[in-house]
Image (tube, rainbow, N blue to C red):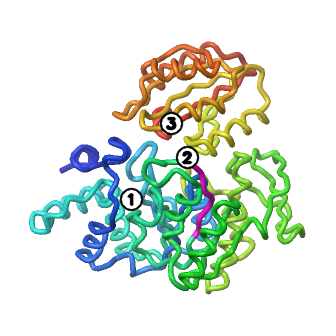
Amino acid sequence: MNYSDTLKYLFTRLPMFQRSGPAAYKNNLDNTLKLGELYGHPHKKYRTIHVAGTNGKGSVSHMLAAILQSAGYKVGLYTSPHLKDFRERIKINGEMIAEHDVVEWIEQYRINNELWKIEPSFFELTVALAFDYFARQEVDVAIMEVGLGGRLDSTNIVTPEVSIITNIGLDHTNLLGNTLEIIAGEKAGIIKPNVPAVIGTSQKETTPVFMHKAREENAPIHFADHEYKVTYATKGLDGKQILHVQQNEKAVLPGLKLDLLGVYQHANIPAVLKSADVLREIGFDISEQAIRIGLKEVVGLTGLLGRWQVIGNNPLVVCDTGHNEDGMRSIVGQIRTTAHKKLHIVFGTVSDKNADKLLALLPREAEYYFVRADIERGMDENELQHQANLHGLKGECYNSVNEGLKKAKENAGFHDLIFVGGSTFVVAEIL
């Protein structure tokens, strides 16, 4: 097999949530545990950090990776989904796993599986690959981002140094539950016995859930936003955010820079800083300089994509992967604080998502370009337009994301803003 053949096998022969949605979801860890056993429990051969949450877990994972890299550690980073290349999911110090490593590992798995007879999902097998790759490359620490939920996620066989939960929102309610309390219970499943837990955002509905789980597991628990706060931010001449941070209402880290531009990142910073504190307390050597360098160069150090990412100027073109209610609410707030004359929104979503709730949040004053993401789950652009019209959102339909973006660029003036989003898969097509 070459790399193209390997991807074809992964994407078409295995149950894949990205393609099939809930039908690919596994409600147990049996396959992951079996694969871990067959590969010699590679996840136990290095230290791990486990990150869950409805929104922000990818950003927090990348920020912590950048900080630890700046502190001199060899850092594995597992995230999902990918945007451009499958290999984005598995990185060491910002470098994606090599194509030949993916090909060789999958070939060997297929040979072995003639005897093993396991039927893993795409995600289960990808996690197993990441665990084994990080072990063979002898990373110092691996940051593992939860794919979906927490309790039954394939990453949840690790015993981490710290468990991080960014926040809780209503997403994947058909699988995780339809209340914040129930979803919090699923996310709380990553809290392990005697392992410190950091909660990024305290919420009245979810705080008791986390407190109860922490007591059950005898796990120290820290609510990061009780201690750290970004009071405001300005923009430096280099285009990066200059964050004004308080710890217990006292100014700290003056002039701290962040190269991730979304205002919503302010809610993620407390989780990052408190997690760094906890890691220091258990023996990690993380200096203030490492924090400053890491946050200033997150994109360069880790290759993070799709978080209020500027992909064009005059007109300003921005994309963002936010795709649930809380994420879209943050994006709309960011749009309103971004100077522009006229707003153009290239928008698409997936058919198993409640588009109505997203559409209700979008600004009516924009010109819309309704598009269909090039995946099986992509919502038909005409159906999306129909639902949008019920919310007073007006625009034309396009059967591809790039066609919609092309038309938006043709229509936009020099001082306009074009936003592309609604789904990770929409953003993936234009990057």
Query: Which residue carries the number 3 mark?
Result: 354
How would you rate the neighbour count of disc 3 (Cα within 10 Å): few for under 14, some for 14-19, many for 20 or more? some
Residue 172 appears in view: yes
Q: Which mark is residue 97?
A: 1
Judged by depth in the image, the label closer to the viewer, 2 or 3, is 3
- In the image, 308 versus 117, the foreground residue is 117
User: How many residues crowd mark 2 within 10 Å: few (<14), some (14–19), many (20+)?
Assistant: many
Residue found farthest to the right? 250
Which percent across, then down, holds residue 280?
A: 66, 81
- In the picture, the disc for residue 305 is 2
**Which region is colored magenta?**
164-170
Q: Residue at x 69, y 52 (%)?
A: 265
In the image, residue 191 above or below residue 58: below
Q: Determine the residue positioned at 47% across, 17% down.
A: 398
Label 1: element kind = loop
Sequence-first tag of 2 and 1: 1
CB within 8 Å, label 2 to label 3: no
Q: Could you tell me the amino acid type at mark 1?
A: Ile
Q: Nearer the viewer, mark 1 or mark 3?
A: 3
Position of residue 177 in the picture relative to residue 19 (left or right): right
Could you tell me if the residues under marks 1 and 3 are in contact, i.e. CB atoms within 8 Å? Answer: no
